[in-house]
Image (spheres, helix red, strand yellow):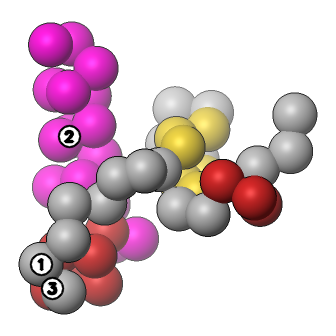
Amino acid sequence: MLNLKMFLKYRDNYEVFKEVKESGRVGLPCIVVNNGEEIIFDYNEFKI
């Protein structure tokens, strides 16, 4: 439940989710890096 709460905090407060919400999507999958410094929607862009 904690992970869902954390995700909803980002989704409801970060501008990067504006387009996602306006199009009626949830915003998953996404990867939140460095406590929200970067949010990646295309997992192919994520490099370890």
- Real-space CA distance between mark 3 and mark 1, rounded to the nearest whole angstrom: 5 Å
Q: Amino acid at mark 1?
A: Gly
Magenta part, dominant SS: helix
Give the residue at mark 1.
24
Tell me if label 3 and label 1 are in contact, CB under 8 Å. yes
In percent of the image, x 20 and y 27: which residue is there? 4
**Visible in this render: residue 13?**
no
Position of the C terminus by quadrant: top right
* First-in-chain label (1 vs 2): 2
Find residue 12 and report its horizontal and vertical position in percent: 16, 55
SS type, badge 1: loop
Position of the N terminus by quadrant: top left
Find residue 8 and report its horizontal and vertical position in percent: 18, 41
Q: Amino acid at mark 3?
A: Glu
- Real-space CA distance between mark 1 and mark 2, rounded to the nearest whole angstrom: 17 Å
Q: Nearer the viewer, mark 1 or mark 2?
A: 1
Q: Which mark is residue 22?
A: 3
Neighbor class of circle 2 (other Cα within 10 Å; few <14, some 14-19, many 20+) is: few
In percent of the image, x 16 and y 26: which residue is there? 5
Please state if 37 lies on the left or on the right of 18 as rendered: right
Is residue 18 depicted above or below 33 in this figure?
below
- Real-space CA distance between mark 2 and mark 3, rounded to the nearest whole angstrom: 17 Å
Q: Amino acid at mark 2?
A: Lys
In percent of the image, x 53 and y 62: which residue is there? 41
Neighbor class of circle 3 (other Cα within 10 Å; few <14, some 14-19, many 20+) is: few
Give the residue at mark 2.
9
Is residue 24 depicted above or below 17 in this figure?
below
- Which residue range is magenta in the image? 1-16
Neighbor class of circle 1 (other Cα within 10 Å; few <14, some 14-19, many 20+) is: few
